[in-house]
DNA sequence: TACGATTGGGAGAGCGCTCTTACCGATGTC
DNA sequence: GACATCGGTAAGAGCGCTCTCCCAATCGTA
């Protein structure tokens, strides 16, 4: 009652004084670690409400060694040799917007905050690894877009849990969430062939990226079942320009192609433009299937048929997996594989 | 030399022991606060190198009340009534990728880390404000996409520096970085008219958003100088669908339109599609100018003529402004206005 | 040579929190 | 009814750092 209503934030001490108990008791009520008598608990809760107390993160993490932060590491997007890796290019893929949005919302439920880190240069990579090793974040959500990335391993060695989007290229002790990419490829093949496609072709992402390879493999696998022994393909960046260029090459190699399965929606969009340039009508002359169901899929004309990845769900699962392991580091590494879904629109 | 090489991270104490000085001296060397004899400094530096010491952020921020974190708050994108605000929609605008990328890279130079927060619901907004008031971040970079947002004011009241992208709709004690949007509109008008456009039209973003309004005003201002007393316009969301819908309405009101200035590139892309649907050729029948020079500008065919915002630079400036004010909170609020630049491609 | 002025390092008190330890009073047991 | 037991609280020691004294050594000057 002898309150100092200065503008400084209230501390545990203040709450304890108001409630007439010790700091320790207040701490117990807040953290629910040990039993506290119901009456005392009420008193303390009331005092907390009265003072508007909120724990100080720095003080807490100084002793608990927990920060309530998760690093969201975006590793350089597939950069060709001599080309500079640029994670903001990854950010410019609307698909990532869905993923990051999923992270933020899911982490929020656990009262964990995302710290955004780019691993676009060797120094930045070191910095990210160090950041983790020093315990500035409790764990990492890693979105890596190139194939043979040593980063997952390095981050894992930092001793904090790591959850990846998509299977690591090399076996690494981390958890990951992935899509059954090969099944997605099969879905696309099945659909294209059912639509009467006689000469399917592939416009794939970088073959060093497991997801790109799996999608193509799945497609070829199913195509083979329908008698297509050879499916021509061209690989390029997971970008609009990449899709356009690859389509050009595909068309050069195989002008009779009448169905294209693209590595992602951005590439599909590029394919659409290349086809138009060549006077091919979509879907009449050539049918096109994308991948991701990112916002661009509804920004093309014709609207893009695509293989949907439940990005938000996958991101939320990553966050859950991470929090789980942060709370109990002894847990085994887990993988969660989602099923793709065909979204049929107007391009097929 | 009698080191305990346990895996625990070295502390100030350890460095002090190795260097044979007190904690205080090591701290002085690290923070450069007071003069330290050159010889001692060297010894300490060597000890730091030997131990691989890096300061513990939590401990440091407990006493300095500084966290080395900057909140990046993405406020709900213009949501119509009954519609849910969704910042990840903002994230799906590739333009934001450039901005966020600029933040990350610029903050990194100051050794400040970005914490991503969405202010998409009233609760999330409260949480963001609280987060700041509790000092969990030293300041805020705010990207708000709706017009009359109370958030800037609330964040400012939290007592930490705030720097906004784009001028706040209401006067608020914050710094901001903006583009001379009206000049951008003028540039577009000048260009369209120089290209022989006789009947210009506007496809604008939400008029509650200052940027959208300024762009339109600038365009009309310059059009008026060329005798166009009335420029028809349709407003909608800053999205592909919004651009498409607005263009439909514009075409309905004014079928003879032969030049369109769109609120941003996404809307321009929508306009392109609407025009194609109506059999109008671009640029022959109708010329189209976008805004932003976001990655989508090179993902349309024809390539989009657009008004460029130097997003990365603007973002970097925001970060610099913020860090400046964090270091010296007494500094006056500053605004930095960038000049737009016309990027001529194939759509005009 | 003696004195104050100056320079640079050390000691120690916290910052706000958690957690172990010790204690105290109320129960259960024979 | 005495003792062991147990639930529940208080006390206090840090976590790693910064920063304010305070003191010792050095310098300059009369």
Image (cartoon, coloured by chain):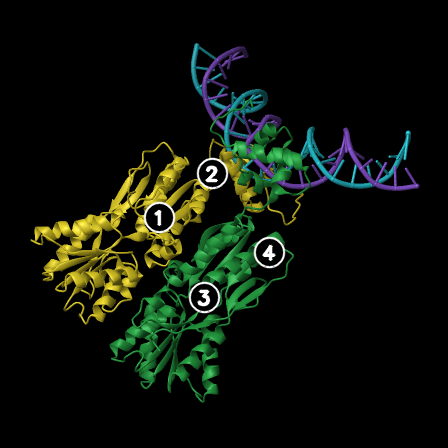
Chain colours: A green, B yellow, C purple, D cyan
Q: Looking at the image, do the residues carrying marks 3 and 4 touch, with CB atoms under 8 Å apart?
A: no
Q: Is residue A163 above or below residue A210?
A: above
Give the chain of mark 1: B
Q: Label 1, label 3: how many angstroms apart (C-alpha)? A: 29 Å
- Discs 1 and 4 carry the same chain letter: no
- Discs 2 and 3 carry the same chain letter: no
- Which residue is depicted at the point 27% across and 52% down? B206
- Which residue is depicted at the point 55% across and 44% down? B53
Q: Nearer the viewer, mark 2 or mark 3?
A: 2
Q: Label 1, label 2: how many angstroms apart (C-alpha)? A: 20 Å
Per the image, the residue denoted by label 4 is A325
Label 3 environment density (alpha carbons within 10 Å; few <14, some 14–19, many ≥20): many
Q: Pick out the residue farthest to the front.
A: B82
Q: Label 2, label 3: how many angstroms apart (C-alpha)? A: 37 Å
Give the chain of mark 3: A
Q: Secondary structure at mark 2?
A: loop
Q: Label 3, label 4: how many angstroms apart (C-alpha)? A: 25 Å
Q: Earlier in the sequence, mark 3 or mark 4?
A: 3
Label 2 environment density (alpha carbons within 10 Å; few <14, some 14–19, many ≥20): many
Give the chain of mark 2: B
Badge number at residue B135: 2
Left or right of B326, for residue B38: right
Q: Looking at the image, do the residues carrying marks 4 and 2 touch, with CB atoms under 8 Å apart?
A: no
């Amino acid at each position: 009652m002898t309150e100092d209503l200065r503008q400084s934030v209230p501390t545990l001490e203040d709450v304890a004084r108001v409630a007439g108990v010790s700091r320790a008791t207040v701490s117990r009520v807040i953290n629910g670690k040990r039993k506290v008598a119901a009456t005392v608990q009420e008193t303390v809760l009331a005092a907390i409400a009265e003072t508007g107390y909120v724990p100080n993160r720095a003080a807490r993490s100084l002793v608990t060694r927990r920060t309530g932060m998760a690093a969201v590491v975006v590793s350089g997007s597939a950069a060709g040799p001599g080309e500079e890796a640029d994670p903001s290019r990854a950010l410019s893929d609307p698909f990532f917007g869905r993923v990051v949005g999923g992270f933020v919302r899911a982490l929020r439920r656990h009262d964990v905050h995302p710290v955004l880190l780019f691993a676009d240069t060797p120094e930045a990579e070191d910095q990210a690894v160090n950041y983790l090793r020093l315990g500035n974040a409790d764990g990492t959500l890693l979105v890596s877009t190139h194939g043979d990335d040593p980063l997952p391993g390095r981050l894992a060695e930092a001793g904090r849990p790591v959850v990846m989007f998509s299977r690591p290229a090399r076996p690494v002790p981390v958890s990951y969430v992935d899509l059954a990419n090969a099944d997605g490829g099969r879905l696309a093949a099945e659909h294209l062939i059912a639509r009467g496609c006689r000469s399917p072709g592939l416009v794939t992402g970088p073959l060093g990226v497991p997801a790109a390879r799996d999608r193509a493999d799945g497609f070829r696998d199913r195509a083979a079942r329908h008698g297509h022994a050879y499916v021509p393909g061209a690989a390029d960046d997971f970008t609009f320009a990449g899709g356009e260029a690859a389509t050009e090459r595909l068309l050069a190699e195989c002008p009779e192609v009448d169905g294209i399965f693209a590595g992602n929606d951005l590439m599909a969009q590029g394919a659409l433009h290349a086809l138009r340039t060549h006077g091919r009508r979509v879907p009449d002359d050539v049918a096109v299937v994308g991948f991701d169901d990112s916002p661009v899929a509804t920004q093309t004309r014709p609207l893009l048929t695509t293989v949907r990845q439940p990005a938000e769900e996958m991101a939320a699962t990553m966050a859950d997996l991470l929090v789980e392991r942060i709370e109990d580091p002894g847990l085994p590494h887990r993988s969660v594989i989602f099923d793709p879904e065909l979204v049929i629109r107007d391009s097929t």
